[in-house]
């Protein structure tokens, strides 16, 4: 089936789903495959649930009326998204990076929405499935889009930018994450740099943190909009404080945010830079940054009956962990407690990177508890627990009270289950 014919169907039914449990009336179902499921088996059910049409890539499931056969459902979904993006021609800002890309996407979108009808990635739907689903939410009403792109192996950003075809790009930073997939820090840099490669080949423009030497090193030949701490850049600001909430000074005005951590300074400045470039009024930029409240356990402050919790348990890698710890050490609190969970997907670097984090704790005025098999292997005097469940059991008879508690670790460690115990 030709993409033009599929696009005609999509134009009549501009709602796409890949989940047979979520089939809005009149939508289109794409039968994707995973490690433990085959979407083809649910195509007929999707029609029963309300979908107008379904696409499958195993011919025995097609009926030629409402269920059509294509060679590869995922590739067709991606091709349809790119075709739709090109038809509409909306200006798109593509965002990637090791840390901060979701927060930056949220901040940039908040700022742009002050002036433009803006579509942006929901949650962290930033992979080979989430990105095309995001693009297929574009309508003629949208004036701009902000699309987040994630990667855990080489070549993944190259694949995504060919679908998104961004006019502008922003790499938040490059750091040590997913080393198991990338092989090395250099592999991370090369993969994130695939966004710059696309912009360079297609006349795009990059918003760049020019204080970051790794980003400067791969930005040759690109039109750049620079931001950072130098007054020579297109946008610059100063960090005022981060204890716990981040405040910055921009153009002589203080902006108090709901963000925790000095490491969010660059993310706020990125949003300022993008907004300024597209002519968003200064007062609107300030309001957008002041109004934004982080969600999904990304540096969220939660006050319980017993403690103040900084919950940063959505993701963790050596770079983000180090930044969180450095910020926490500088905070002025009477009693500080750290609950750190394993950092995943570090491959052969796992042992040394977990030991480095454990070493950072030495000499600091904190109580610390280290959770998970990787931290169990570290040499440290701090208490270690095999799992979050084991620590939970201990915590029930060893209450922590009157403390500021930083909870940081990979999402798979399920550290958020500790909140109700603190």
Image (cartoon, rainbow, N blue to C red):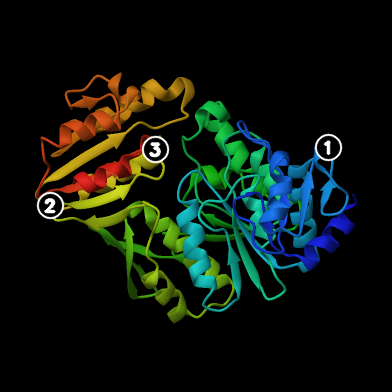
Judge the density around disc 3: few (<14), some (14-19), many (≥20) Cα neighbours within 10 Å.
many
Residue at disc 1, secondary structure: helix
Q: Is residue 96 left or right of residue 99?
A: right
Viewer-proximal residue, 394 or 361?
A: 394
- Marks 1 and 2, the one that precedes in the sequence: 1
Q: CA distance from mark 2 to mark 3?
A: 24 Å
Residue at disc 3, secondary structure: loop
Tell me, yes or no, if residue 230 can be seen here.
Answer: no
Query: Which residue is outermost to the front?
Result: 48
Q: Nearer the viewer, mark 1 or mark 2?
A: 1
- Is 57 rendered above or below residue 25? above
- Is 340 rendered above or below residue 219? above
Residue occupied by mark 1: 60
**Where on the picture, by quarter, is residue 349?**
top left
Q: Is residue 65 left or right of residue 332?
A: right
Q: Residue at x 25, y 56 (%)?
A: 302
Residue occupied by mark 3: 410
Q: Residue at x 46, y 79 (%)?
A: 284
Residue occupied by mark 2: 306
Judge the density around disc 2: few (<14), some (14-19), many (≥20) Cα neighbours within 10 Å.
some
Q: Residue at x 16, y 31 (%)?
A: 394
Residue at disc 2, secondary structure: loop
- Marks 2 and 3, the one that precedes in the sequence: 2
> In the rendering, at what x and y percent does residue 239 appear?
32, 61
**Where on the picture, by quarter, is residue 377?**
top left
> In the rendering, at what x and y percent does residue 182 appear?
57, 30
- Is 353 rendered above or below residue 166? above
């Amino acid at each position: 089936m030709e993409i033009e014919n599929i696009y005609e169907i999509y134009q009549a039914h501009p709602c796409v789903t890949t989940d047979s449990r979520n089939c809005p009336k009149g939508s289109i179902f794409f039968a994707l495959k995973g490690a433990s499921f085959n979407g083809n088996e649910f195509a007929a059910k999707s029609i029963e649930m309300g979908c107008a049409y379904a696409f499958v890539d195993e011919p025995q499931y097609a009926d030629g009326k409402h269920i059509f056969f294509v060679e590869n459902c995922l590739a067709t979904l991606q091709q349809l998204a790119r075709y739709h993006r090109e038809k509409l021609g909306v200006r798109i800002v593509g965002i990637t990076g090791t840390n901060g890309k979701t927060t930056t996407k949220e901040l940039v979108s908040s700022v742009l929405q002050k002036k433009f009808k803006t579509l942006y990635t929901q949650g962290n739907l930033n992979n080979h499935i989430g990105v095309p689903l995001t693009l297929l939410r574009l309508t003629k009403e949208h004036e701009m889009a902000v699309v987040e792109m994630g990667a855990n192996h080489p070549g993944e950003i190259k694949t995504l930018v060919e679908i998104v075809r961004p006019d502008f790009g922003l790499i938040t930073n490059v750091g040590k994450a997913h080393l198991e997939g990338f092989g090395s820090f250099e592999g991370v840099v090369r993969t994130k740099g695939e966004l710059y490669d696309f912009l360079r080949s297609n006349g795009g423009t990059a918003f760049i943190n020019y204080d970051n030497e790794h980003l400067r090193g791969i930005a040759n030949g690109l039109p750049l909009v620079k931001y950072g701490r130098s007054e020579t850049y297109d946008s610059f600001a100063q960090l005022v404080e981060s204890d716990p909430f981040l405040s910055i000074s921009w153009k002589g005005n203080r902006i108090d945010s709901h963000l925790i951590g000095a490491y969010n300074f660059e993310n706020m400045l990125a949003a300022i830079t993008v907004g300024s470039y597209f002519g968003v009024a200064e007062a609107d930029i300030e309001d957008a940054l002041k109004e934004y409240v982080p969600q999904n356990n990304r540096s969220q402050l939660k006050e319980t009956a017993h403690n103040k919790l900084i919950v940063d348990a959505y993701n963790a890698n050596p770079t983000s962990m180090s930044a969180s710890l450095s910020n926490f050490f500088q905070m002025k609190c009477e009693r500080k407690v750290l609950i750190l969970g394993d950092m995943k997907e570090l491959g052969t670097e796992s042992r040394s990177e977990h030991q480095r984090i454990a070493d950072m704790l030495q000499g600091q005025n904190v109580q610390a508890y280290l959770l998970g098999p990787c931290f169990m292997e570290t040499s440290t005097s701090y208490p270690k627990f095999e799992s979050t469940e084991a620590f939970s059991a201990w915590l029930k008879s060893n209450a922590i009270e009157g403390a500021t508690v930083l909870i940081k670790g990979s999402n798979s460690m399920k550290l958020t289950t500790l909140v109700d115990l603190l």
